[in-house]
Amino acid sequence: MLFKKHLAVAALLGCGAQFACADTIQLKDAAVTGKILAEKADSLVVDVGYTVLQIPRNAVTGVTKSSAAAVSTAPAPAAAGQFYAATTKTSAARDVSSLVKQIGEAVVQVKTAGGLGSGFFLNEDGYLITNFHVIEGETEISIEVYHQKNGQLSRETYKQVKIIAINKFHDLALLHIEDKNAPKFMPITLGSADALNVGEGVFAIGSPLGLERTVTQGIVSTKNRQMEGNLFLQTSTQINPGNSGGPLFNLAGEVVGVTNMKITFGEGLGFAIPVELVKSFLDHRDAFAYSTDNPNNPFRYLEPPSRTRQKAPEAK
């Protein structure tokens, strides 16, 4: 599946404007109490009564909302009723070899009649993320998963795949495996692209040119490369057609981006959608629900052409 450039739109994380009680934002060396007015991809907007503060995401270590417990900052599986697991604070770095053994099973190959791409599981119920352009215009989708059994990898193909939500402007798609008797799947924790530093190590797992479970490693070249008015993570990690939709990890094994394109006439010039946009897409997935009546739907059904009719001879 060829990499394509897609428009990205700045996204806001949904948050109600009114709160019965104050929220507490825990910073690295202090805490702020007030009403969260907006949760942006790179900051929180907080009303503290006498003024409004805009707090950078990379300064936030946790949030305690009036109606919920503090946001966990440690990687953990999605809790019951939670759609995906996420953290805002990077965990300790580990070697890539051990991480690949631990989380490699969560990375899948997405196959269509027109090509292939990559993806990764969000939860054990078979919901996964890939690029929109991987499944664009396709009616038959299959997912290849590599299960670990007794220390060995066993490839399984699942063909009952449903499109749940799509956002072609951010080049994201949410799929669900609905095969009967499908097992529980291994999910991956979503990390924070905001917490990355330029020069920090990252790695990708995917299926470049159909070579499944290929691991490549590099660094973050820049966190906010602007292309056609949109911001991407730029990385020296080698990505190629087939990597599309796969995860870009930090060295804690957390997803920090979704690989989606590269500069074709250069090497080491890959790009990924920041994970903050992925979280926003998932948090608002009902608004992007796949439907033939949805304006964001990739399919446009037109009336079939009518059969050619012979004109009746004109009266003389």
Image (spheres, rainbow, N blue to C red):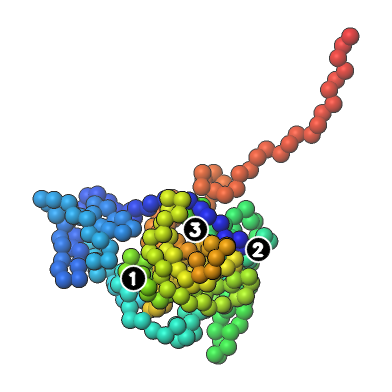
Residue 62 rendering spot, x and y as whole percentages: 24, 68
At label 3, the amino acid type is Leu
Disc nearer the start of the sequence (1/3): 3
* Quadrant of image for the N terminus: bottom right
List the residue tagged with mark 1. Answer: 197
Q: Is residue 177 above or below residue 43?
A: below
Residue type beneath disc 2: Gly
The residue wearing badge 2 is 115
Q: Are marks 2 and 3 in contact (CB under 8 Å)?
A: no
Mark 1 to mark 3 CA distance (whole Å): 24 Å
Using the image, tell me which numbered label, if any, was put on residue 68: none
* Residue named by callout 3: 172
Q: Toward the viewer: 199 or 49?
A: 199
Task: Please give left or right for residue 146 compared with residue 71 in the image.
Answer: right
The residue positioned 43% from the left and 53% from the top of the image is 230
Amino acid tagged 1: Asn
